[in-house]
Image (spheres, rainbow, N blue to C red):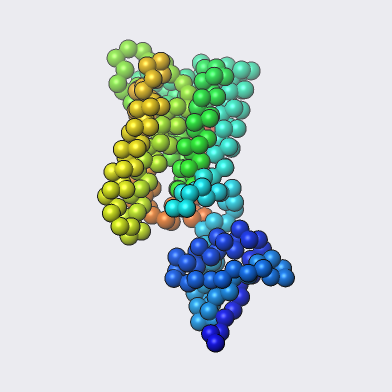
Amino acid sequence: MESTTVIHARTRRQAMDWSLVLASQGIEPTIQKGEQGFELVVPAEHFEIAQQAIQKYRAENRGWHWQKMVFQDGVIFHWASLCWVVLIVVFHWLASTVDLASRGIMDSALVAHGQWWRLFTAVWLHGDIGHLATNATIGVVLLGFAMGRFGVGPALAAACLTGVGGNLLAWAASTQVHRSLGASGAVMGCLGLLAVQSALLIRRGSTHPRRWILGGLASGVLLFVLLGLSPETDVLAHLGGFISGIFVGAALVAIGDNVRGTAANLLGGLLFLLLVVVPWYFAWRE
């Protein structure tokens, strides 16, 4: 009879997560109810490998518990995107009490005269509650999936950069004075991130990766046409955000699975904080 050993888990969900981790290492555990939670029964000869795999998984996911797997192929939605919604709501509330619009709106003439921070600050401002609600409802979904794929910190920083990319294209392509505000460029940027994330399949040895990559890009383009080309919206900012999302997403894909690690999340979170605080410091000082 084969010798077995037990790994203890607090909850059934934790046991299920760990069993998926072990299955990826070629170890097929048996889950059973124990006296103090749940247990994963594994062959004794695989115990050390199983423990190392679980410890690595816990280290890479420490502190990020707001995740939910929504499809069996591993697509994860991260509810931390609600924090981004709270942030844009707070900025909208502040703008109703303090004149943030004149200090932060993207004005192509002022940007051309050196007020570069407007490319960043405009991402956090909205014209009215309807504008805010539209970006919040679409953004919370797209950013949530981007966070699930790339990690909270990297996805937040990437979304902010893609919003800036959208404003940058709107500024560079405008032949007249162009004024705009809103997070729609960042929202379209998240769509770009998701359109290119299928390239991760190459690194994971998936069969027919080219088909998945082309399918992901085609789906992203179709959704962009549906969501980002309304005549009454800032199409240039949407296009710039979407294209920026593809390039930033490609850079994150090049990093590989380490992009979801603790170090990458901390660095991404710090970069996001700087991208918010530093431009608003210059805007307020001006």
35 left or right, relative to 106: right
Residue 22 at x, y percent in the picture: 50, 68
Q: Is residue 9 above or below residue 269?
A: below
Residue at screen point 44% across, 53% down: 73
Residue 235, image x, y percentages: 36, 22
Residue lying at 35% horizontally and 54% vertically, measured from the top left: 201
Query: Is 246 positioned to the left or the right of 180 in the image?
Result: left
Would residue 43 be found to the left or right of residue 222 on screen? Answer: right
271 up-or-down from 259: above or below: above
Q: Position of residue 164 (x, y in %)?
A: 41, 30
Picture quadrant where residue 16 is located: bottom right
Outermost residue on the right side: it is 35
Residue at 46% x, 35% y is 160
Residue 121 visible from this viewpoint: no
Which quadrant would the N terminus be assigned to in this image? bottom right
Q: Nearer the viewer, residue 65 or 251?
A: 65
In the image, farthest residue toward the front: 1
How many marks the image carries: the answer is 0
Q: Quadrant of residue 108?
A: top left
Q: Is residue 252 visible?
A: yes
In the image, residue 265 sits, relative to residue 51, either above or below, namely above
In percent of width and height, residue 177 lies at 36, 13
In the displayed structure, does residue 125 sit left or right of residue 171?
A: right
Q: Which residue is at the front of the view, 101 or 109?
A: 101
For the view shown, which residue lies furthest in the bottom direction?
1
Identify the residue at horizontal 32%, vertical 40% (top origin): 217
